[in-house]
Image: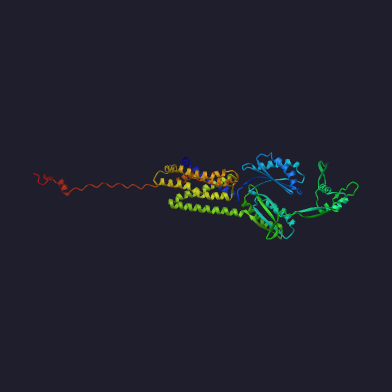
Amino acid sequence: MSWLSKFSLAQRALIGLVSIIAIVFGAIAIPQLKQQLLPTIELPVVSVLAPYQGASPDVVEKQVIQPIEDNLEGVDGITGVTSTASEGNAVILASFDYGNDTEQLVADVQQAVNRARVRLPDPVDPQVVAGSTDDIPTVVLAVASAGDQQALADRLDTTVVPALKDIDGVGQVTVDGVRDLRVTVTPADAKLAKAGLTTQSLAQALQAGGVTVAAGSFDEAGGNRTVQVGGGYTSLRQIQDLVIPARPGGKPVRLADVATVKQEEAPAASVTRTDGKPSLAVAVTMDHDGSAVAISDAVRDKLPGLREDLGAGASITVVSDQGPAVSKSIDGLTTEGALGLLFAVLVILVFLASVRSTLVTAVSIPLSVVLALIVLWTRDLSLNMLTLGALTIAIGRVVDDSIVVLENIKRHLGYGEERQAAILTAVREVAGAVTSSTLTTVAVFLPIGLVGGMVGALFGAFSLTVTAALLASLLVSLTVVPVLSYWFLRPRRAPPRTPAKPAARPRRRRRTAACSASTSPSCGSRPGAG
């Protein structure tokens, strides 16, 4: 892997430009990352809900469940079907393996249910539902008013719901706790018998009276217009005055003459209370591209205006909100990352005793994290509890490669070697060790993302985040760190050489020097010589 360093040193300007572009691109992409509490996990189940009011479990099984199951058998990818028949309701769960295209499976199941409609009773309208973690409401509001609950629900539908749906990333806004009004017709058996009618006659008359029937068309002013007869019921009085055809020879009768017709609240499917008082719940759910934090902030910004739209006497309370929890987690990661960077810089400064070396490492750590976040953005992943935890783990590891490479470069520069040769030699010595240690750690985390089932769906983003951060740190240590070392570090200069002093001549004895200066023939003669 040392060839990367050789290429980087030969193209120093290119490496510097690419690093700057990566930081600028990260500054643009990171704020666009989705922020959620949990990663998006598509549940491997498609549900078919088919209510059939008034039918017994046996009837629901034979007339609803069996036709739908027969058509689901032909859908590819379904591994099992589980059905439950209860009084007035049918629930069919079609399970499949992780990794299949959920949207395509939902479309296939919907087509199978549509084919089964011809065999279903008329009142049955099955709904196909696919669930995921994104279906957990991002924000839940409780709305209370001293007035009528039905009037409050109407005001919510006309003011609050449209305003919340306009928020970027919101997929659905639902109002729960509303008790709808219904009209109950209770036949009087004695009056029916006297008029010669049956309950079936009443049901047919009610059904026929509320149906719109096409009655032809005509041309007018160069255009064609259609004619319709009948329509839905608009008032309780209209139902009471409905005329029931009598038996041959008898008189038609009003529905109110043979039955009791009254309007009442339907049984509550859900009940919401705030501070012990009845209220309505408004649940805001984000779509696949939504961000919990952005939706939370937008909802809170709109609350004052929504309270004014509802009028005096109405109150809106935030019951649950994912935004603050996600924001707190992100703030905690930012604080821990900054502290980790600070302590890493201080430790490097203490052990390397060089401000220049510290600056090199201080640049390499954030760059590795930015590259990892860019990978998350390109993969359309979000910042959530698992990816934030992965980044926290990675922050303590990404600095290792850069420190090893930097310390060895500093050591070779300390020998007084030529700068580029020292950097290449230093990187060549540790490139194998740095690469093997990083790939060993990657080999631990990467297989987690390759596991199937719920584990793979839950921890896949975690594995990808750690892997991306570690590989980014390896790339930075072998490319950016050598270039920064070339720019900031200097080889140690050898101490200047001092000129050598001339060697001292040996001192002669005085007597010898005197003899050499004398012309006496006896000079140099030894004592006693003849």
Residue at image x 74%, y 56%?
150
Q: Position of residue 331 (x, y in %)?
A: 56, 54
Residue at image x 65%, y 45%?
45
Quarter where residue 324 is shown: bottom right
Task: Report the residue that reaches farthest toward the right.
Answer: 249
Colour scheme of the picture: rainbow
Q: Position of residue 511 (x, y in %)?
A: 15, 48
Quarter of the image containing the C terminus?
Answer: top left
In-image side of 233 versus 495 (left or right): right
User: Is 232 located above or below residue 1 in the figure?
Assistant: below
User: Is 329 located above or below residue 425 in the figure?
Assistant: below
Q: Position of residue 381 (x, y in %)?
A: 59, 46
In-image side of 106 versus 260 (left or right): left
Q: Is residue 169 visible?
A: no
User: Foreground: 437 or 85?
Assistant: 85
User: Foreground: 279 or 88?
Assistant: 88
Task: Report the residue that reaches farthest toward the left.
Answer: 530
